[in-house]
Image (cartoon, rainbow, N blue to C red):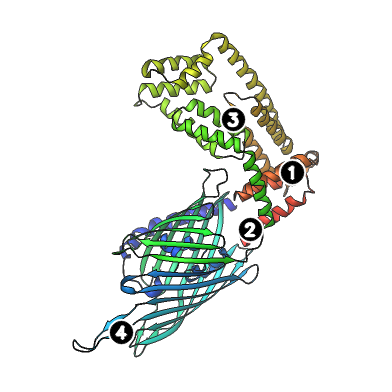
Amino acid sequence: MQNTYNKIILALLLLLLIFQAKEIYGYSGRRKHFLSHGPSVAAFGAGETVFSAYTDPSVLQYNPALMSFAANAVSVSRFNLFEGSSYNSAALAFRLCKKFYLGLSASNLASGNIEIREHIYALEKIISVNSWNYVFSFSGFVESLAVMYGLNVKYVYFDMYLKKGSTYCCDFGLAKEVFLVDTIKIKTAFSVQNFISNKLKLDYTFAEIPLICRFSSAFVLPTYYRFTSKDTFNIYVDLKYEDSFGDFCVGLSYIFAEKYALRTGYYSRHITFGAGADFYMFTLDYAADFSEIDLINRFMLTYKWGKKCDALLKEAKIALDEEISSMKIAQEEFKKAKELYNKKEYLKATDKLSKVIVSYPNFESPNHFYNDIITLMNNNANDKNLNFADKYYAKAYIQYYNANYKEALNEWTKYIAFSGGKAEVFEYKDKIDNILKLKEMEDREKEITLKVQKLFQEGIELYTLKKWIHCIKKMESVDKFISNNNFSKSVEFYNKAKEYINKCVIELSNDALVVDSNDKESLREEVKYDEVTSEKKYREGLVLYAQGKYYQASRMWELTLRLNPNHKKAKIALHRIKKIKLE
């Protein structure tokens, strides 16, 4: 049901963008009101998109509901504009209790000193013009709907030298975050600014306060280049209606290790860029605009405090550090494999990558490189326009890793005839050139393959009988056998076994809710206390949690409790992960 709901949200977002982009683009670029622009430097760097500033307390000026994403924080910002003018802001957001936030913000648009004369011969006067916006914000969280809401009350004051005036306004906002697939997230928000407002009276004239409606969305995509990576690539899209006009804003950001950010974006025929960095409890953000006559610098400094110590996260980081320490050899081997990959020595690279994949299952990056090589070799082998040398190399690669050694020898002979050969190919060719070696290799390959197939088939039978835990243990024995006996199809069987382990974990989660009467006896048989394996699964869950892979971590802890229902730490961890969106 949740997956269906997520897909519907994604489809509606895409349809809305497709149908509105053309219409909105025609109106963009017009001159905006003082209240049309927010004070966040992070948002400006990503094209004035709202979700790029969700950890910044000044986000309350865009949508008060988004305070519920932020930590306790205070920020100050300054935009140096043209001819001495500036846009300055300060904001504060803090948690009242578990589900409620309060915020305060003030922003000022100042003209700087302006020289005026009543007539050409009069003495000059130095004046300045100021616009002020004071905001009081409240936000909360509806747990049953997993929706955030917020309300702003604003006091707007204009000092136009000869004319002064003020008025009150109100804003309202909603926001929701959903997981699309595991750690891939979609954030959506809607806000209406100045939906309640009086006309601004400037002596004997009146000025309208614009009604601003904004639909905001963010797509958060995790990246897995490094084992310790918590990097994310973020796509932001905002649709903004101001009275009868519209704007289309888009932004991109790449966040490194949840500490450093690079941003770029587009709004109203402006291309922006920016960067941010966290230092202890401080965040410094910078942004600028490519489309301006002069490069105008924008800076913001944010201080965050009062974040509760997460005991689970602390334990998870220790587990991750221990995992990293134990993986130094794997990191070195992976580095060598990448060097071989870059040199196009794909045979050696594949062997190194397969060893790392099988020996270190939590290290995901080698799998990406391994799959890239397989895809490349299959494409090259079938590419009619490719030169003969590369084509024969690819064909030999495929035959070699399918254990068809005679065919691999024939293809390598052709490769050498066209290219003259290279050291890597001669090395692998020598392994199987001798007939006795060839027979020995083929016999070993068949023997290991048969043993793995037997273990794997036993695991499938256990899965068919719905003996999930026995199936997991059998598939783990497949992984262990493969790690001790490297052969041509190591990664293929390893990935198949891993797939069945994941399927069993899903079924165990379902069984926790509904158990068929015919299945109760087998379920009791499967739930035998296994403290050693349960502790291993708990620690695997800790590593996943430290990497930000909450969905996978929760599955691993559910399995821990099936192996050992008295595992107190796993119970606490599962409770914590269910409440993580409220933190």
Circle 2 residue: 580
Q: How far across and how far down the image is residue 267, in percent?
A: 36, 62
Residue 355, numbered label: 3
Instruction: Classify mark 1: helix, strand or loop.
Output: helix
* Element class at badge 4: strand
Separation of residues labelled 2 and 4 (CA atoms): 55 Å
Dot placed on the residue nearer the N-terminal end, 1 or 2: 1
Kindly identify which residue carries mark 1: 535
Q: Position of residue 108 (x, y in %)?
A: 42, 76
- Asked whether the residues under the numbered discs 1 and 3 touch, taking CB atoms below 8 Å apart as contact, a structural biologist would say no
Upstream in the sequence, badge 4 or badge 1?
Answer: 4
Q: Quadrant of residue 331?
A: top right
Identify the amino acid type marked 4.
Ile
Give the amino acid type for the residue marked by disc 3 in the picture: Lys
* Disc with the residue nearer the chain's start (1 vs 3): 3
**First in sequence: mark 2 or mark 3?**
3
Dot 4 or dot 3: first in sequence order is 4
In percent of width and height, residue 269 lies at 32, 61
Q: Quadrant where the C terminus lies? A: bottom right
